Image (tube, grey):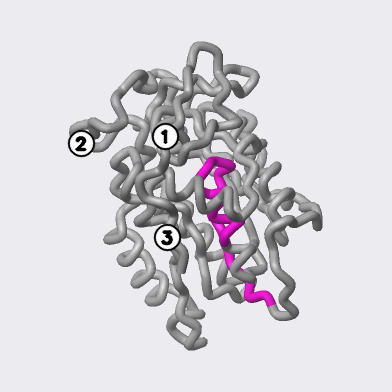
Amino acid sequence: MAGRPPSRQRPVETSSRNPISHVSNHRPPAVLLLSGGLDSTTLLAHAVHEGFDVHALSFEYGQRHSHELAAARRVAERYGAAEHRVSRIDLGLFGGSALTDHNLAVPMDRDPAQPSAGVPVTYVPARNTIFLAHALAYAEVIDASDIFIGVNSVDYSGYPDCRPQFIDAFQAMANLATRAGTEEGRPLRIRTPLMSLSKAQIILMGLALGVDYALTTSCYAPSPTGAACGRCDACTLRLRGFAEAGVVDPALQVEGVEQSTTTAAHPFPRD
């Protein structure tokens, strides 16, 4: 029986156009997990602005659609990633999530202000653990001490691998499991600058950095053309964030979805 082609990473060349970076002769390398969504795009803009030479890493992991990978390629090129790689793994082999198993329905029309009981069906088992493990290997190869991930524990769907406790535990493990941490005296840091921000604060942060959110996608169940459904948890959290930020989401202009804008109660805090 013929097997599938061997998994391999494919580098994606990026443009030198970069409206947000500042000049640095010695930019330290960093690995950044890039999904093409709102959070990771903001994170990319932030990391480049902070002076890192960002090596973006995305995954083709058996997810329901490829629109997020297309968005990741767009934002990697637009916002100055030094390199963008896409790693192919197949989490659909195990299933267990509405994002990798088409037999499981994506929940719709839930109130984002009312968190669901327990971990939702859109949680992909161990996804961030697997993604961070790949990022850790990548970081060792390019001598990077910093790994950026756009996890958030404020306006999120209740995933256990988005909490500070998980990040702290993974960082401790990373420094016990790598040559960089055990022999080279080069501690590895998992950076999560969005962890304690609301969705509105993340959006305001991105807008201050010049992010064009029309390039991004967050929807769990888009149409074949990539149009957002406006009804899944990711869409409703995103819509609420833009409303609280007082701006209209340029990527969520979906038929029948009315957007409102209010003044953000908590503007994004600056360091």
Residue type at mark 1: give it: Thr
Q: Do the CB atoms of the residues marked 2 and 1 lie less than 8 Å apart?
A: no
Residue 189 higher or lower than 255, as above or below: below
Q: Which residue is mark 1?
A: 262
Residue 51 coordinates in the image, percent (x, y): 64, 71
For marks 2 and 1, the one nearer the N-term is: 2
Residue occupying the point 35% across, 22% down: 107
Residue type at mark 3: give it: Pro
Residue occupying the point 54% across, 32% down: 249
For marks 1 and 3, the one nearer the N-term is: 1
Q: Which residue is mark 2?
A: 118
Residue 39 among those drawn in magenta: yes
Residue count near mark 3 (Cα–Cα under 10 Å), binned few <14, some 14–19, many ≥20? few
Residue occupying the point 61% across, 55% down: 209
Looking at the rendered image, the disc whose residue lies closer to the viewer, 2 or 1, is: 1
Per the rendered image, the range of residues in magenta is: 27-46
Q: Which residue is mark 3?
A: 269
